[in-house]
Image (tube, rainbow, N blue to C red):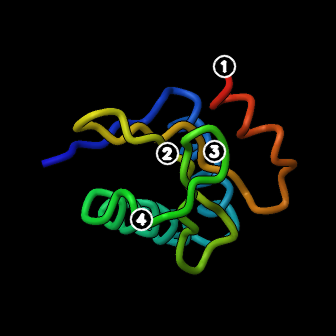
Amino acid sequence: MKSAGFRPAAQADVDAAYKWYEEQRPGLGREFIAAVDDAVGSILAFPESYPVVHRGARRVPLARFPYSLFYRIEGQRILVVACMHGARHPQRWRSRIDG
């Protein structure tokens, strides 16, 4: 069975989005975290079902939120490298994959 982990920068992305949503409406940040958790669960269940978007990294969109998780399959581990808003320039998450 695969396990999942977040690079520190990806966790910082999630934390920043949580804080922003929670400031917009109490409880909305928790809903964002639930969407992240659901996406991670889906990745763990079907890791190869999401499209490769750049150098082996895959993308899964979050339900209800304009964010996506970008991840790599590394043996029996899923490594989330970024959680980015859809309006962000692709170079921002690509630099995390390349670096």
Q: Secondary structure at mark 2?
A: strand
The image shows residue 44, relative to residue 49, as above or below, that is: above
Amino acid type of the residue that numbered disc 4 sits on in the rendered structure: Ala
Which residue: 67% across, 44% down?
54
Q: Tell me the distance, in whole angstroms, between the alpha carbons under discs 2 and 3.
A: 18 Å
Q: Secondary structure at mark 3?
A: helix
Q: Give the residue at mark 4.
A: 39
Q: Position of residue 81 (x, y in %)?
A: 54, 37
Q: Residues within 10 Å of mark 1 (few under 14, many from 20)?
A: few
- Residue 71's disc number: 2
Q: Position of residue 89 (x, y in %)?
A: 87, 48
Q: Tell me the distance, in whole angstroms, between the alpha carbons under discs 2 and 4.
A: 11 Å
Q: Tell me the distance, in whole angstroms, between the alpha carbons under discs 3 and 1.
A: 21 Å
Q: Give the residue at mark 3.
A: 16
Mark 4–mark 3 CB contact (< 8 Å):
no
Amino acid type of the residue that numbered disc 3 sits on in the rendered structure: Ala
Q: Give the residue at mark 1.
A: 99
Q: Residues within 10 Å of mark 2 (few under 14, many from 20)?
A: many
Amino acid type of the residue that numbered disc 2 sits on in the rendered structure: Tyr
